[in-house]
Amino acid sequence: MESKQICTAYIALLNRRDQEGSIPTSFHWVLCYLPRSDDDTTQGFYVYHVLDESEAWEQSKHVNPVHIEQNDRFHIVIKLGHVLADINTVTDFTASQPATQDDTPLLSTHRKWSCALWIIRVLADFQEAGLFSAIPLQTEDDKMKFYRRIYSAGALASGYPNSDFPVVYHGEVKMTQYK
């Protein structure tokens, strides 16, 4: 019997440019994948995110893996879980997702579309396709909890003591596990 290939999904949090030198209060979210089930980051991540730099949302992606930890705004990578598909399927699916809000409802925490909401929508679409079940994202409550936990992981990784998101290093990559 043929075993199904899997990838691992992560969210990288980048410090926002306007918060350099201070404790971050918000982050730019980046969706990352490794083409295997372990945390071997030596070859880099496949990276996807959306930007609103010209008043029009656009997707930014890298055709080849990159070492996101080398970005000067890199904060932490949060491991989410496995996607039950090979890397080509995962990256093609992600690249096909529109950067704009379209008919996606905003969470009650948001007044406008964001990089975080785009990632939540992509992961929910993977879940709807039966490819991602590590984190429930069916309801608005599920999505709100996920948003808050990712934000908390980023804030706690800033050095707050007694964090329930222990930080480990995989090479130069500062990482924690979503829970």
Image (tube, helix red, strand yellow):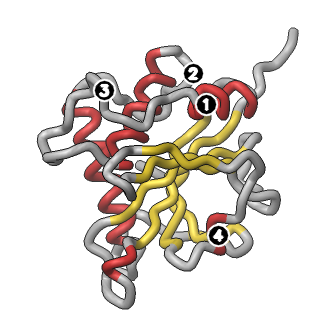
Tell me where residue 172 sits by quadrant.
bottom right
**Alpha-carbon span between mark 4 and mark 3:** 34 Å
Going from N to C along the chain, the mark reached first, 1 or 4, is: 1
Left or right of 93 in this view: 152: left
The dot on residue 131 is 2
Residue placed most toward the observer, 141 or 66: 66
Crowd tier of the residue under label 3, counting other residues whose Cα lies within 10 Å: few below 14, some 14–19, many 20 or above:
few
Disc on the earlier residue, 4 or 3: 3
Q: Amino acid at mark 3?
A: Asp
At 58% from the left and 71% from the top, the residue drawn is 174
Residue 32 pos. (x, y %): 59, 49
Residue at the spot 48% in from the left edge and 72% down from the top edge: 75
* Image quarter in which the N terminus is found: top right
Q: Does the rendering let one see residue 174?
A: yes
Mark 4 lies on residue: 173
Nearest to N terminus: mark 3 or mark 2: 3
Which label sits on residue 102?
3
Residue to which mark 1 is pinned: 83
